[in-house]
Image (spheres, rainbow, N blue to C red):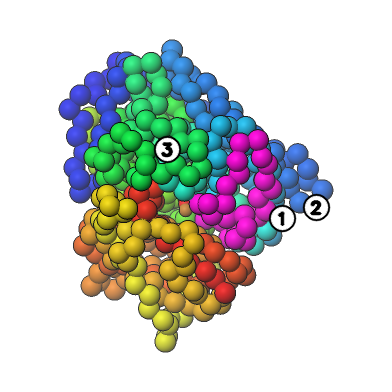
Amino acid sequence: GAAVAGCSISPSTSTGQLLPSRIALPRPFTVPLPSMPVLRPSTTDGRDVFDLVQRPTTLEVLPGARTDLLTYGGTFPGPLLETRSGRLAVVRHRNALDVPVSVHLHGGHTPSASDGYPTDLVRPGESRDYVYPMRQRAAMLWYHDHRMDFTGEQVYRGLLGVHLVRDDEEDVLPLPHSDREIVLAIVDRSFDEHGQLHYPSPDAGAGEHAHHHVDAPGVDDGHIEGVLGDVMLVNGAAWPVLEVDAARYRLRLLNGCSSRRLDLALDPPPTAGAMFTQVGSDGGLLATSVKHEHLVMAQAERFDVLVDFSKYPVGTQVTLRNRFGSGPMGAVMRFVVARRSGDDSAPADRLPDRLSEIEPLDTTGARVREWSFTRGEVHGKSGWVINGRPFDPEVMAATVPLGETEIWRFRTDLHHPVHVHLDPFQIIGRGTSQGPGPFDHGWKDTVDVRPAEHVDVAVRFTDYAGRYVIHCHNLEHEDRMMMAAFATV
Ligand code: C2O
Ligand code: CU
């Protein structure tokens, strides 16, 4: 098996404590990449209705081991949902778990009642229709648990999945599709000697008023920094391998880790052309494509990139590396360029210059709101706070008029991936530099705010009045109260 000892993570690249696995791990690049199971709607009469039962399942995540999981519909990750822009989708969740849940569609432009507010729980035995009008453009969204105080643990144990929105604008672009569009959901996990997931909480948290940081005894405060697994899983398989044609592919990447940031690169690099041609980000297509020699992805961010495997000789083994990780965590998966093949999609240089229209939000005269993300005291213990306050689901930290553009300024002490619900934003400046950083293009819903930095974003909420949240997407920070509620009016 792969050696895992001595894998250390620099605190400047990821925030968290490494949990060493206590079971033999598979040799990297031997397990085939699982393709995402697709959930078909059960009704398509005027709207798409999807049925999902959240239930405990035991799966063979590591070859030869059995792992108990909390799942959406029995798979890990949950099934891929595909919906159309402008067409009403309803996801009917039944909770057959023994813990309360709340479902958030991350990146969804969702009415408040279906947004998965952290205290808006679906209790064991209950069902809930989450209603998604899908008044939004094509994008890669993801859905995950959002239960107050237990999001980190419940996502870690399996409650996450990918949701793709499609639209006509994207359909007409000459992008690789079908077998050459690959969804890659990347998460890190750790396993105990029995193959069970290793997470620091001793408490499954069945009581809905349980709080890790208030009354759960024995929680190791050392893990408030975050949790770093030592096994890289892609679509639920450890360091998998995928055979590809020598052709262009579209990779839909999700960093679904709780606390781990990724810096992705291909090894070896292609002999010619860009390593990655980015065509989209969290909120869908970019205005024009952007070339990258590596991709820094904070937690919850998505990148939509083209990789041209025709730039490699047949037989090349191309490793997707994580340059922020060392040892086994320095690799994510491997592609093997297996065969020559006709390419039915245009080469990168024949993509249209304009992929989409992104109108910059007009910030003239915009109100500036500051959100400061720091370590702080939470109920007498060490935790994480926003503007000095721990999350209180009953207190609205801001009231924001619908339709008005505001500048939100995020300040931090350390790395915090900041996520805003309801609508995406545009990054207009980082620190003293004007304009977005290289990985900040397009519509974003999560921004990687780096130590001692401030980031300005332009945001405008539309359509739905109600309560929403802004929070750190290091899930252990979120659970230790780095979240704030706001109301749209
Ligand atoms: Cu991906 Cu509020 O979460
Ligand atoms: Cu954080």
Check contact, mark 2 vs mark 3: CB within 8 A. no
Assign the magenta stretch its main secondary structure: loop
Task: Write the residue at 23% across / 59% down.
Answer: 413
Label 1, secondary structure: give it: loop
Within 10 Å of disc 1 (Cα), the crowding (few <14, some 14-19, many 20+) is: some
Judge whether residue 119 is colored magenta.
Answer: yes
Q: 389 or 475, which lies in front? A: 389
Of the numbered discs 2 and 3, the one sitting upstream in the chain is 2
Residue behind mark 1: 88
- Rounded to the nearest whole Å, what is the CA distance between mark 1 and mark 2? 8 Å
Question: What residue would you read off at disc 2?
Answer: 46
Locate residue 259, reporting x and y percent.
33, 44
The residue that appears at 57% across and 51% down in the rendered structure is 120
Circle 3 sits on which residue? 153
Q: Distance between the residues labelled 3 and 1?
A: 31 Å
| x and y, in percent, of residue 367 in the image | 41, 81
Q: What residue range appears in magenta?
A: 106-132
- Distance, label 2 to label 3, CA atoms, is 37 Å
**Residue at the outermost bottom position:** 365
In the structure shown, which secondary structural element does the residue marked by tag 2 occupy? loop
Estimate the x, y position of residue 265 in percent, counting from the top left: 31, 42
Q: Are marks 3 and 1 in contact (CB under 8 Å)?
A: no
Q: Position of residue 437 (x, y in %)?
A: 31, 63
| Residue type marked 2 | Gly
Which residue in the rendered view is the most extreme toward the top? 64
Q: Say which of 227 and 281 sits in front.
A: 227
